[in-house]
Image: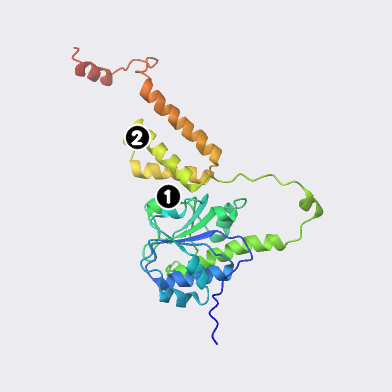
Amino acid sequence: MVSTVKRVIESDIEAPAIVLVEPTHPGNIGAVARAMANMGFLDLRLVKPQIFPSPVAKSMAAGADSILRSATVYDTLDEAIADCRYMIGTSARDRTIDWPSLTPAAAMKSIEGVKAADVAFVFGTERTGLSNAQLDRCNTVVRIPVNDNYGSINLATAAMLLCYEYRQSVVEPREAQLSRYEASAPTKPSLQPAPAELVHGFYRHAEHVLNEIRFLKVHPPVKLMRKILRLFNRARLTEEEVNILRGVLTTIEYELDHRGPRTDLPPESGDSAEKDATRSGAG
């Protein structure tokens, strides 16, 4: 008699979420699930998959069906990472705006001290990868060093490489023997990054205020705002820091609404003053 009991993959480590953005082929979803099971990753999140669920995905999962069954589907990337605090995005192509990128091994060091449940590895659609706007939502960008003459890498392979590097960063230190001093010394609590949803709210708030004070209207707005976002992404803002920054922005908004024209500025001189006088009818 054939057993109908469905096998449930269990993990021997705590691992980040894997987020696939708009995957086009169900076979790749299944292959990623198989790679996740190999490395002890269980949390698969799909953003607008073209075809899912699918028997092709199940076949390619090769027994990792439980990861497919528990996978969650979202309409947007923001929804998929709403409960995360640190996102590692992947990119294989050159960008018009240069993103500082890390190797997979270096990226794992960037999340030391961050709880695994607060981390997400984000992969883009197979043909074009993550868009610039989607990369904006990531704290760190990873580029896998491959042959310059052939840079095409399969989605499941890329996922396996990042999952492997994470597993190595967790398993090896855990198995290393600690000295008595290290084992008994009190550990300093690490500062956890703020939730992605909170940080994104701060970014929207900052963009609104920068527009209000005409900062973004003086410069090329899209590229400049992207550079500002990258600056804060590198800082790994905590929840308290986000609240402080939003308090600063709120104060700026209040002053803009309630303060009259400034009287402490020196009078304009030269051509600009003459133009103002002409506009006001003086002369």
With respect to residue 80, does 259 lie above or below?
A: above
Name the residue rendered at 41%, 70% in the picture. 53
The secondary element bearing badge 1 is classed as loop
| CB under 8 Å between discs 2 and 1 | no
Crowdedness of circle 2 by 10 Å Cα count: few (<14), some, many (20+)?
Answer: some
For the question of whether residue 157 can be seen, the reply is no
Q: Distance between the residues labelled 2 and 1?
A: 19 Å
Residues 205 and 5: in front is 5
Q: Residue 136 carries which label?
A: 1
Is 4 situated left or right of 282 in this image? right
Horizontal arrangement in the rendering, residue 53 relative to residue 160 (left or right): left
Whole-percent x, y for residue 99 in the image: 44, 51
State the residue position of label 2: 211
Q: Position of residue 10 (x, y in %)?
A: 60, 68
Q: Hey, what amino acid is under mark 2?
A: Asn
Query: What is the count of numbered marks?
Result: 2
Farthest residue in the front direction?
1
Amino acid type, label 1: Asp
Name the one closer to the observer, 227 or 9: 9
Secondary element under disc 2, as helix, strand or loop, is helix
State the residue at coordinates (58%, 56%): 116
Mark 1 neighbour class, 10 Å CA radius: few under 14, some 14 to 19, many 20 or more: many
Q: Where is residue 244 in the image (x, y as percent from the top left)?
A: 52, 33
Residue at the (58%, 68%) spot, across then down: 39
Pick out the residue farthest to the top. Answer: 283
Residue 107 visible somewhere in the drawing: yes
Task: Find residue 273 and report its horizontal and vertical position in percent.
Answer: 27, 18
| In front of the other: 201 or 10 | 10
31 w.r.t. 176: above or below = below
Image quarter for residue 259? top left
Q: Which quadrant is home to the N terminus?
A: bottom right
